[in-house]
Image (cartoon, grey):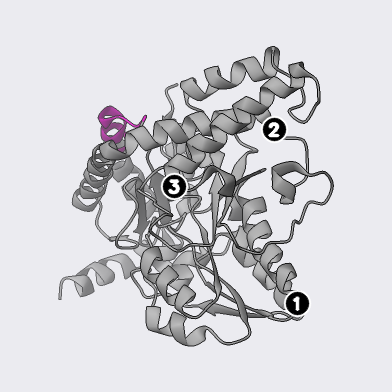
Amino acid sequence: MRTVYLDNNATTMVAPEAVEAMRPLWCDLYGNASSMHSFGGQVASYITGAREQVAALVGADPAEIVFTSGGSESDNLAIKGTLDAFDGAKRHVVTTRVEHPAVLGLVRHLSQRGYRVTELPVDPDGSLDLGLLDRSITPDTAIVSVMWANNETGVVFPIPQIADIVKSRGVVFHTDAVQAAGKMPIDLAKVPVDLLSISGHKLHAPKGIGVLYVRKGTRLMPQVIGGHHESNRRAGTENVPGIVGLGMAAELARAQLPNEHRITALRDRLEAGILASCPGVRINGANRLPNTLNVSFEFVEGEAILLMLDDLGIAASSGSACASGSLQPSHVLRAMGVPFTFAHGSIRFSLSRYTTGEEIDFVLRHLPGIIERLREISPFAKDGEFERALAADHV
């Protein structure tokens, strides 16, 4: 059975070019880059090259790139490392209610340990009130953390403006750019971000490798203590194959950025097709990433939709893979005020540069029938709620 993979915000296929770049580091060049001998020392040049490739993707200096195990570690290092650098002098964190669990889970953990956390609300379209953000910063604020793009809805936050506000108040600014990196231009030479997180497996690199960008002069305490790796910012023998794979993926993503309009066109084609063929639908979020479509079907369970799609070989998601297993609607959609009857029927389709028009058409041929069959057995639809809702929408 064919697989139509539309869950690229959860993880991506490793680019074939990245696999080939990593291959020698698994088989032949397996030395430790920190070794004194030349067999290990030669590996260090591969790390240097990858650091330069990642830096070029986001407009950074290679010395500002710290390799980690992924986005969650990068977020933890940014926030906890900043708080530790203040050594208790500042104990307030500002973030949003729609952050990835790697940030929200951490700040809620910190709130139980004496830190004060402000979680900013979002508007129904997923946007942030920048005035409220500014008013939330206090003399005790150590760090503000706002994602560049939301992993569930694809909503893009105005990070350049947010960074200007935060820096005008003299506060450290972190952004989780896990979903944004490689999908939209980022130039840290022009945007005053202090700390920025990247995860390799979201841009066609392998799992288990990530980056924390640390602007020169930013105080940060390491969270993994040990050797002198990564300029004393993150101990542990380097995952050289992963680093090299991420470097190649970053180079490919940078070259692909001018062609993101092709992915946008496919996303819009999917969106228009769903709106035209399925009644009782809403699109969640405005100003989105080119690849992301979060759509809600009223009076239908998202899990049931996913199972029926899976029977056809179509892979999608009901939200963040890191929050799966919960029967509660997405915290992102709840924060946006999406009605309960819609929120439970939300599906995220996320495309990549490998997505084809044929795959989009395959989904559009089958999805309307799935929604129709599920509504036929929905107790809410049977009670006439669906017809009344449609009628109200057309008043």
Q: Nearer the viewer, residue 257 or 327?
A: 257
Residue 82 is situated, as x and y percent measured from the top left of the image, at 67, 67
Estimate how packed mark 1 is, as few (under 14), some (14 to 19) or many (20 or more) residues with alpha carbons within 10 Å: few
Q: Image height check: is 48 above or below 60?
A: above
Q: Image height check: is 43 above or below 344?
A: above
Q: Residue 336: name its quadrant.
A: bottom left
Q: Is residue 355 magenta?
A: yes
Q: Which residue is mark 3?
A: 58
Q: Nearer the viewer, residue 324 or 208?
A: 208
Q: Give the extent of the magenta segment.
A: 354-363
Residue at the (44%, 27%) spot, across then down: 3
Magenta stretch: helix, strand or loop mostly: helix
Whether label 2 touches label 1, CB < 8 Å = no
Whether label 1 touches label 3, CB < 8 Å = no
Point out which mark residue 239 bears. 2
Report the amino acid beneath label 1: Gln
Horizontal relation, residue 112 to residue 257: left or right: right
